[in-house]
Image: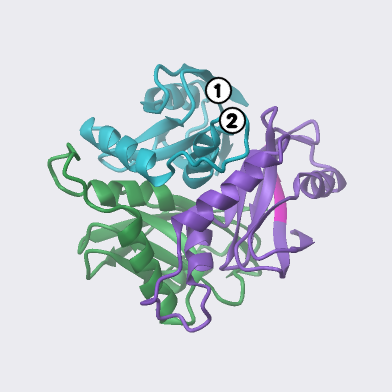
Chain colours: A cyan, B green, C purple
Amino acid sequence: MEQIEVQTQARQEFREITDSVQNVVQAGGIADGVCFLFCPHTTAGLTLNENWDPTVRHDLGLVFTDLVPHRSDFRHAEGNSPAHAKATLVGNSLFLFVRNGRLVLGSWQGVFLAEFDGPRRRRVFVEVIPT
Amino acid sequence: MEQIEVQTQARQEFREITDSVQNVVQAGGIADGVCFLFCPHTTAGLTLNENWDPTVRHDLGLVFTDLVPHRSDFRHAEGNSPAHAKATLVGNSLFLFVRNGRLVLGSWQGVFLAEFDGPRRRRVFVEVIPT
Amino acid sequence: MEQIEVQTQARQEFREITDSVQNVVQAGGIADGVCFLFCPHTTAGLTLNENWDPTVRHDLGLVFTDLVPHRSDFRHAEGNSPAHAKATLVGNSLFLFVRNGRLVLGSWQGVFLAEFDGPRRRRVFVEVIPT
């Protein structure tokens, strides 16, 4: 099990980690398999989306901000309940196929760490099972 | 890694692909394992839900339309930012258990391609790891 | 493939199942691997979130109730369309890494069955693939 470390910069941020994941896969030397990614945090998640046009990330941010607004009747004293809910909506784990040592991604797809309560130091665990 | 092709018909559509996945699993000949599905698109996803009563799909459509409305301050010039956000909410990958060559599904569960920016030609990659 | 049974108590509830999953993993005797969890229901899902402070679960409940309200134009006659939509938002499957026979979880992470149409008897299927 390998580990990627990411220092996020903003309260909410979709930070691309495709190249870091690809580097871990290559170093592991498994040509064909399934690559599993796991984010051990409760206010951040993992998602795939377009990595070509940065406006997509910007608009995703607007959507998530709107989707889970602050409420005065939240009980969690840390004040980051929206971040917890967004993490559950996005999910903490995803997998990708690996062929010839490369991640199999659509033309516009990148892997993103979704930060909802940053800036923080975040980790992503990576493991490849050969097929 | 096998591939399923789907031609969606509407802008937004929950299109069942359970039988296509089952056919790929059967052709692969692995009796017991985990079947991984991956959707290489940024405005479509994969989900499980009820396949018996088609009104469930209809109501899911209403929910997703409401959940992510268009906003005048979206910056992505293609105008499909809601579709990108819905794909992140639904997710692009899922797995199913396989027993005796059959997908393990609940009584009412089917596998759906969630189209959010159709009609388009979509692909789903399928791979089974034996257990 | 093992099975966990859960009797939920409320209409909507985030019920922790971390210990039950850990017990299944330990009984299976695989030291290092990936543990796959699958929920065969269309109005319940699986998610990871904070298990230390119970107010997080409470606030998650508020968010999900708000996110998918009832609508008069829902067609599904059972009246539980919001529960179906919430299950698709949360997802029905997730995986966890296993090291030395223990689930790899962040300091605050627990595994939850997300009940959206309870109280009901629910099942979660568990399988570990060694790495």
- Amino acid identity at mark 2: His
**Chain at tag 2:** A
Q: Residue at x 46, y 41 (%)?
A: A96
Magenta span contains residue C128: yes
Q: Residue at x 54, y 55 (%)?
A: B95
Q: Are marks 1 and 2 in contact (CB under 8 Å)?
A: yes
Label 1: which secondary element: strand
Q: Residue at x 59, y 45 (%)?
A: C59
- N-term-proximal mark, 1 vs 2: 2
Residue occupied by mark 1: A123
Magenta-tinted stretch: C126-131
Q: Residue B86: percent from the left, percent from the top?
A: 35, 52
- Amino acid identity at mark 1: Arg
* Distance CA(mark 1)–CA(mark 2): 8 Å
**Along the viewing direction, whichever of C35 and B65 lies nearer the viewer:** B65
Q: Residue B36: percent from the left, percent from the top?
A: 51, 53
**Chain at tag 1:** A
Q: Residue A119: percent from the left, percent from the top?
A: 46, 18
Q: Residue C65: percent from the left, percent from the top?
A: 52, 57
Residue occupied by mark 2: A41
Q: Residue at x 30, y 49 (%)?
A: B41
**Along the viewing direction, whichever of C110 and C130 lies nearer the viewer:** C110
**Type of secondary structure dominating the magenta stretch:** strand
Q: Is residue A125 above or below residue A82?
A: above
Q: Is residue B61 above or below residue A78?
A: below
* One can see residue B109 in this view: yes
